[in-house]
Amino acid sequence: MIEIKTERLRVRSVTINDFTKFVDLEGRLESYQYESSCPLSLEDSKRIFDKYITDTCDFPNSGSAMLSIIDGQDLFAGEIHIKCNWAEMKEWEIGYKLLKEFWNNGYATEAVKAVAIYLFEQIQIHKLIAFANSDNMKSEHVLQRIGMKKEGHLREARIVNGEYKDELVYAMLKCDLTENI
């Protein structure tokens, strides 16, 4: 079970009690405004959530986990997904979503940074990567604020609302993290 505390947040392993908030977050249009896929149906949400519950219970052996972001009032604010992309290189990927009510509070930066620290220090990863739609400036700023470096710009790498969109690749090594703690 993962439990990370920051100044204002708790980031913890997802539990079955998070399902209704997961469905709410995954069903919102704003959660997918920069994504190739569309909001999830209840059936798809249940299938994906069940897999995350199973994977999170077996973390880190499973190679993936979903974490819930909980604010100071004990409210579900969003989620963070982590997965191992390349075991031999110890390369992991991070993604995140917040409920709109929690945007513009610095929660994404605070939570993502805390998880990055956890992955480097506890799981001993070598590299952390993240992908962002080039139109999603807020997400790009989160990645920059925690010390990730832009490693790539993939042209027309995803289709969003019928249009080709560029995708940015950000990454960090442990030395990048220690420069920003």
Image (cartoon, grey):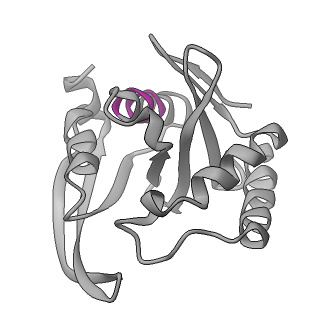
| Residue 156 falls within the magenta-colored stretch | no
Point out the image quarter for the N terminus: top right
Q: Residue furthest top?
A: 7
Residue 20 percent coordinates (x, y): 75, 47
Residue 18: quarter of image: top right
Image: 135 above or below 154: above
Tell me which residue sits at (34%, 66%) in the image.
34
Q: Is residue 137 left or right of residue 131?
A: left
Residue 67 percent coordinates (x, y): 62, 40
| Residue 157 appears in the figure | yes
Q: Nearer the viewer, residue 37 or 4?
A: 37
Tell me which residue sits at (26%, 44%) in the image.
143
- Range of magenta residues: 109-115
Tell me which residue sits at (75%, 67%) in the image.
42
| Residue 110 falls within the magenta-colored stretch | yes
Residue 164 percent coordinates (x, y): 24, 86
Image: 50 above or below 144: below
Residue 27 percent coordinates (x, y): 60, 61
Majority secondary structure in the magenta region: helix
Q: Is residue 31 left or right of residue 16?
A: left
